[in-house]
Amino acid sequence: MRTVKEKVLVIDDDAGFLEQSRQWLQNAGYEVFTAENGTAGLRKLFTGRPDIILLDLSLPEMDGWEVCRRIRDMSDTPVIMITTNGQKSDILKGFSLGADDFVGKPPDFPELIARIGAVLRRSLSIRREDKPAIFHHPEIEIDWRSHQVYIRGQLVKLSPTEFKLLSCLIENRGWLVTHEELLRKVWGPDYITDKSFVKLYIRYLRQKIEKDPSRPQLILTERGIGYRFSTQIKEPIS
C-alpha cells in the first residue's frame, strides 16, 4: 500500500461502473472521486487536481473527445480513455488529442490498475526529467537552487516563508491551491486551521511582485477557497 495516495478521477455516466471502479481502485490504494458527466468532471479536475483521469468516450451532452480537448487546454494530467468499440480510428484520434492510453469497456480491472500504474510512473519520470533549474515567466524568473527571485528583471529579496509560499503557488500554477494545502506545505500540519497566516503572507508577496498589489494579476484569489498563480498576464488598461 502506498503511503501517499495518488488521486484518480473517473468520468463516466454509468453509475454501476463508477461504483465498481471506486471499489477496485480504493482496494488498490488509490484515492478515488467520480463525475457522471463532462462538465462535472472538468470541475473536479480543477478543484481536486487528480493525478490521472479515466474518461469514458460515450458521455451525454459533452462527449469524451470534447472533454479530453478541454482537459488538455488546462492540464497535462494523464488521461486513459475508456471505449466500448476499440476501433483503431478512435484510438488514433484519442492519441492525437493527448490521451495517454486506451482500455476497453468493461475493462479487466487488474489490467486497468496495471495500466494506471504504468502511466503514472511514466508521467512522474517525464516531470522529473523536464523540471528546469530556472523558472521563466514574463514577470518572474526564479533560480530554484540559489533561491534568487527576479521580478521584471530586478532582484527581489523574499523571506524564506515568502519564497516557500511563492514556490508552492508556482509549482501548481494554473491550479487552485486551497488555504489548507498552503498551510500544510508552507507552515506545517499544526497550522492548517489558521488562514490568517496565508492571507498575511499573500499580501506581503503581492506587495513585492505585483505591479499593482490592489489589482493583482499574478496571485489570484478564489474567494473563500484559496489562491492560484495565473499563467496569463493581461495587458494593462491605458
Image: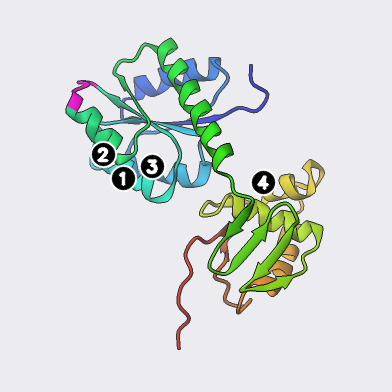
Q: Mark 2 points at which residue?
A: 65
- Where residue 84 sits, quadrant-wise, is top left
Secondary structure beneath disc 2?
helix
In the displayed structure, would residue 101 be above or below residue 157? above
Is mark 1 in CB contact (under 8 Å) with mark 2? yes
State the CA–CA distance, disc 2 to disc 3: 15 Å
In the displayed structure, would residue 133 be above or below residue 4? below
State the CA–CA distance, disc 1 to disc 2: 6 Å
**Amino acid on which disc 1 is placed:** Arg
Which coloring applies here? Answer: rainbow
The range drawn in magenta is: 84-88
Q: Name the foreground residue: 37 vs 135.
A: 135
Q: Which of marks 4 and 2 is in front?
A: 2
The residue lying at 80 percent from left, 57 percent from top is 160
Q: Mark 3 points at which residue?
A: 40
State the CA–CA distance, disc 3 to disc 4: 22 Å
Q: Name the residue under label 4.
A: 181
Q: Position of residue 8 (x, y in %)?
A: 49, 30
How crowded pointer 2 is (Cα within 10 Å; few <14, some 14-19, many 20+) is rated as many
